[in-house]
Amino acid sequence: MIRAFDKPSFARTFALTILAIGALFAINVFLAKAESEANRVEAARFYENGQRLMQAGQSAEAADQFKSALSLERENQDYRLALGEALLAAGKIQDAQSTLQSLLDLNSFSGPANLAMARVLVKQDQIQRAISYYHRAIFGQWKENARANQVRARLELADLLSRQNSKEGLLAELLPLQDEVSDDIATLEKLGQWFLAADSPARAAATFRLVLRDDPESADAYAGLGAADFAQRNYRAARGNFAAALRLRPSDRAIAARLDVCDRVLTLDPTLKGLGVGEQSQRSRKLAELALNSLKQCAGLASTSSAAESIEAAEKQLKRRASASSDIELAERLWQKRKTDCGQTGAPDRALALVMEELAQ
Amino acid sequence: MSTSPVRLSVRLRQTLQPLQQSDARRALALSLAIGALVGLVTVAFILLTGRLAARMYPAGGAGWRRIFVPTLGSLITGYLLWRFFPFARGSGIPQTKFALFINDGRIQFRTVFGKFFCCSASLASGIALGREGPSVQVGAGLASVIARSAGLNKDQVMSLVPVGCSAALAAAFNTPIAAVLFSLEEIMGDLHAAVLGTAVLASATSWMVLHLVLGDDPLFHVPGYRLVHPVELAIYAALGVVGGLGSVAFVKLLLRLRDYFKGLPKWSAWFQPVAGGLTVGLLGYFRPEVMGVGYNYVDKILNGDVVLKTVALLAILKIVATAVSYSSGNAGGIFGPSLFIGATMGASVGSVAHHFFPTYTAGPGAYALVGMGTAFAGIVRTPLTSVIMIFELTRDYTIIVPLMISNLIAYFISYGLQRAPIYEALAHQDGVHLPSAKTREEGKRMRVNQAMRVAPPAPAEADGDEFRRLAERLATSSEMPPHVHPDHDLSLALERMGASGLTVLPVVSRADVHKLLGIVVLDDVLRAFGVSRPSEARESTGLT
């Protein structure tokens, strides 16, 4: 080659340079491919180590392995996602966010990346942004098990919304889930609870019935169905379901308490169908007396002077014999007075409050 | 069959005939070819040093290998450099400037080969130097070899040398604009050099080749930069101070050590690089990050993966390792190490700042990024190149202002404490006085208006009559005689006097060339340069 350059010649030099370019290009491409392949194998090894460490709960160590994998294969989105998730699990929220953001910059439709980012934002208490990323995850691209992963993302979002007490948003997420999770009893039970939280007791009841169809021994399903009936003011049905739940799980105090409330409502409500006239009068009088006591209690707590006149008048009226309807009217007046004068002061009797609400309607 | 090569040669000549018809076309064609070739050689350099290093001292490998490999590597390359490639020592930048300004752009193919081979071996064995400076010499050398083999004249060869430099740096750093700027700012010392067009062409070609072979994977994977709060600018200024002081410490240590090694007996020259290899090996035994180019670790730092104690320690260790490696005569540059040193210094400052003002500051990674430019500006003293280089690495406009603040402070501190830039000081140690930016600037400051005799506004005396005659002649003359403008360099006035054989030239206005502003006389010009003639020569304008 040096000899070729001995005698100056533009044409020969140019041709030799082009030949050298061709040869070097071929060598470089070969070297680059060898390098790339070696990097790929090494990166895969780091990734596998990271996965193992993640499963063992060593997320910080796993993140280091994923970082090493990523430094060798920058474009690999799986490694980047794994790193983001490991950083999140290790509590390095900012780092996780920037890693996932870089992944989303590469592919904004990535379902898993959007889901991980939503989790990061939940940790940062940026709920509205998190909800938006959950939606992107639900409608995003998933390499495998797309349907199942989308349902998983939606369930996670529903859980977040129920914790945030966002009833409308929650209901909007639950409706598409109904058909998707019909085979999974545990998820159906959760769904029923969320329907209750979203103020949709009828759907909750239907869901719990689905559970009971497959698992008639589910105390949770009976309790949930009871709660759904209770929310629909069907206290008799609620009582039956709570009783069934308590039979299956006798030690559950929460169910027992709800059953007690049902019993008290059912023994207090003067408007229940099938009651005799005497029973109706007796219950009306009892209701008026309870309403009076409640007003007295809260008047004592709130020290309102105007309540004293109402109390005195009610006591006089109760000394007289009166019809059931006038006792109910008195009870309603006293209850209204209580609400006006006392507001939230002094917690009213739950069963009494439920019956009074029923009467008001 | 025997006529085939001849016919091929004839056809080749015919095909290339259009290219040979003008200098501009030849320069254009050669710039493209040089850009592609140098780009490919630099890519090979990157691949070889990266891959070989991974094999020689793998991450997590035995500690003894980290001592043995650089020691052996420096021993072998030291002998080869001493015996076969004496011009391939060091970084390559002073050698390139030497070739350009003193040797008419001549760089031997042997030097190019030696530089490539010895540097590859040196860096692969873990010597704490960089590959960018050597790439520049290899690029310049290839340009020189090709230009001379193509039968170009001396000036054309010299004009292609910076083209090779641009192509090499564009591929080595993945920063095509900074590469051109560096060639003009540091190699040529003139941002308005005529080679700008061809340098840009070669740089772009080289950059394309890099991306064609290695893909779009950048040199550093830089996370998004963000200026969190304007208060941060004060911290970047502090980084400039730290970077400036760190740069001066590095340069002074390197020069002193080199002075020491140069003072040792000449026969020991082949063995001296072992001092560098052993130092790197011993430091690398405890901190492997010090070894080699270290860009993988810089990448980690940029991504904020740092611990204050570690990065602060690494900044010091890298300064020592690089200074000893370079001064003892190993082949390799200081660009890469200056980026490493800058990143570690920046990350240290950033870690401290983020610890005390977490809500007002970005993470250490952002400071490491700015620190890279800061150290580069402080050590290499090319502030414009350093700003553009980091800007190209981040492709983020918001980094410009912090970078400028930090870089300029580092630059001025470095200038204040160490007057001669590193390449100039290295050349001085070798007894070579290259034209520096300062001397060129001083030359430019000598203007015609400093030596001219101003034409009187209303000429009435004898002198005034001469001026009046000259003014009248200029006003009526259709062809302009040799002249200068007040803002011209005095050297140009001398050139024009020499070309025209005159000792007096009219100084005319740029706005109206027929308007006489004064005259410039040879003796006045010589006096301005501090030279006086024993006897006054007869002055003649040729016009009177």
Image: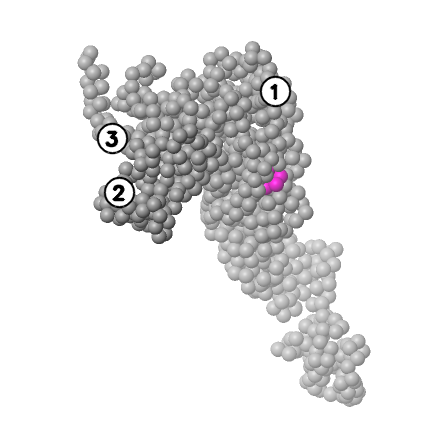
Discs 2 and 3 lie in a common subunit: yes
Q: Which residue is drawn at 52% across and 35% down?
A: B381
Q: Magenta segment range?
A: B240-244
Q: Are marks 1 and 3 on the same chain?
A: yes
Front-lying residue, A18 or A328 = A18
Name the disc covering residue B260, or none: 1
Q: Which of marks 1 and 2 is nearer the N terminus?
A: 1
Residue B434 in the image: state x and y as whole percent.
47, 27
From mark 2 to mark 3, how far is it between C-alphas?
Answer: 30 Å
Looking at the picture, which amino acid does disc 1 mark?
A: Tyr
The quarter in which the N terminus of chain B is drawn is top left
Residue B241 painted magenta? yes
A348 or B529: which is nearer to us? B529
Secondary structure beneath dot 1 equals helix
Residue tagged by mark 2? B480
**Residue A253, placed above or below residue A80:** below
* Sequence order check, earlier mark of 2 and 3: 3
Q: How many marks?
A: 3
Say which residue appears at 70% left-offset and 73% top-offset.
Answer: A353
**Badge 3 amino acid:** Ser
Quadrant of res B533: top left
How many residues crowd around disc 2 within 10 Å: few (fewer than 14), some, or many (20 or more)? few
Q: Where A10 falls versus B207 (above or below)?
A: above
Tell us which disc is closer to us: 1 or 2.
2
Residue B34 visible in this rendered orientation of the protein = no
